[in-house]
Amino acid sequence: MKKMKRLFVVMAAVVALLASAQPSRPKLIVGLVVDQMRWDYLFNYQWGEGGFKTLLRDGYRCNNTIIDYVPTVTAAGHATIYSGTTPAFHGIVGNNFMLHGKNVTSVQDDSERGVGGNDKTRGKSPRNLVTTNIADQLLLASDFKSRIVGIALKDRAAILPAGHRPTGAYWYDKDSKSFVTSTYYRDKLPKWVSDFNKKHRTELAYDQNNTPMGTTMTFAMAEQALINEKLGQDDATDLLAISVSNTDMCAHYYGTHSPKVDSIYYQLDREIAHFIDVLDQRIGRGNYLLFLSADHGGTHSYPRMTAHGLPSACWYNPDALKAANELLEQQFGVKQLIKAEMEYPFYINHEAIDNARLDYNEVMRAACRALEVPEEIQWAIDMSRIDTYPIPTILKERIKLGYFPGRSGEIYVVPRTGVYAGKTEWDGSNHGTWSQSDSHIPLIFMGWHITPGETSRLTHMTDITATICAMLHIQAPNGCIGTPIFE
Ligand SMILES: [Zn+2]
């Protein structure tokens, strides 16, 4: 009996010790990714109190955060921010890429089906993301008690941040004009999402891409997720990943510094202010950790640059593919030796080479030469021989960090700096290159354990997740290559 009592005392002491050793963690992490938000927009777009102004005043700001891979596009950016690693490891090499010889979107999953909306055929999932991300690590650290939700207008921007086992991921379906999900997550929309779609039927029928309404609906959905999924209400750290997509879609159409884009950022400033109020009231400023960043920046259009006498040029990838294939056909007598382009990555047609019994290396050399014909192109690189090219190390590393064999194109095309991928008459912005306009992104942390301040030393997109994991004392995602920012 005495022995039993002693054992009980020892066990109670162990339990107490374990409890006291629990690291204190925030109740909620809020990720706010603004699609195509250039770093300098932080300083262009400060209107009222509570939005960007509050983030700049109360947050810790990194002024020199860079994307370390190319191409700098949406799916890769969202995957990288939340996994702390680059496409070479997480596998999301673009918005579209080749998978088992088929052109797929980053989140396409034909083994799943749509839930909500009209089109039930197109399923989506994060299965193409081959590493874990911070959402997965939170689940592992909390013994799967954390609650994770991803919200965005774009599917990839809701799915990739939320990791592999979230409570839910919801995106806007423009056919049914409602927020939807996929059977990967659940077979039926939760009641709160159906109710949201019904309640906001009129607002959701607006053009979400090119009007501030898309911003308002994104944050309204996020607020409902916060309330209905009871995020930040217990000891396990939850994650709410919000991505603002219309900032990108509108800029692609109307261009940087266009009144349409300005109006969306104005609304974003207001929505951030409101959302911070909601978080402060429901969770408390010291109990949540919020970060704001972007999946990539954006270039000014050719008309905008040339109107002011600044250097710019255009290169249009579909025309480049056509012209290169014509040259290759003249040389080898075979059509379509380059199968496809995904803007900068070009895919070689292995089947056509084999069928015509051509020499693969000879075709590759000729294909690179053909793609290098336009003066706007500096290098067309055979990726299997990248180390033999006289490319500056900084750029070579970024190309390698974006390359995943089997998914990426065998040839990577690098335009001269400042070349815009598109047509001369287009007013819209674009992105995808290594240059400052596309790779310099905003980064601010605010809330739990954050002292206001700033640094201008070089930090990286991959450092965001590394920093949060280090602050929370949880293991970083399995592919993480970032370094915690600890000023
Ligand atoms: Zn984007």
Image: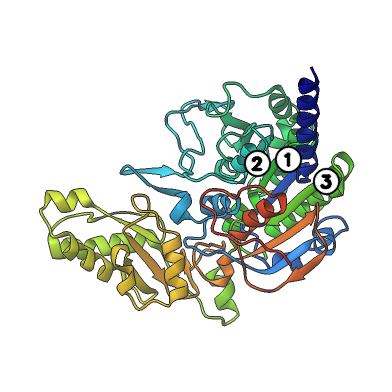
Q: Which residue is found at the position 48% from the left and 50% from the top?
A: 90
Quarter residue 361 falls in: bottom left
Q: How far apart are marks 3 and 2 (CA)?
A: 16 Å
Answer with left or right where residue 71 lies relative to residue 11: left
Instruction: Determine whether label 3 and label 1 are within 8 Å by CB.
Output: no
Which residue is pictured at 69% across the width and 35% down the height?
Answer: 146
Answer few, some or many: residues within 10 Å of disc 1's Cα (few below 14, many 20 plus, some between 14 and 19): many
Q: Which of the 4 image quadrants contains residue 376?
A: bottom left
Pointer 1 or 2: first along the chain: 2
Classify mark 2: helix, strand or loop: helix
Report the residue marked by disc 1: 237
Q: Which of 18 and 73 is in front in this view?
A: 18
Q: Which of 153 and 156 is in front in this view?
A: 156
Nearer the observer, 311 or 457:
457
Q: Can residue 176 be seen in this view?
A: no
For the residues marked 3 and 1, what is the alpha-carbon distance in whole angstroms?
A: 10 Å
Residue 409 location, x and y as percent? 34, 56
Mark 3 vs 2, N-terminal side:
2
Mark 1 and mark 2 in contact? Answer it, CB < 8 Å.
yes
The x and y percentages for residue 253 are 58, 56
- Which quarter of the rendered image does ligand 1 occupy? bottom right
Q: Residue 138 carries which label?
A: 2
- Mark 3 element type: helix
Query: How many circles with numbers are drawn on the protein?
Result: 3
Amino acid beneath label 1: Thr
Which residue lies at the image location 51% right of the left edge and 35% below the top edge? Answer: 125
Give percent across and percent down for residue 442. Answer: 68, 63
- Tag 2: amino acid: Leu
Question: Disc 3 or 1, which lies upstream in sequence?
Answer: 1
CA distance for labels 1 and 2: 7 Å
Label at residue 287: 3
The amino acid marked with disc number 3 is: Asn
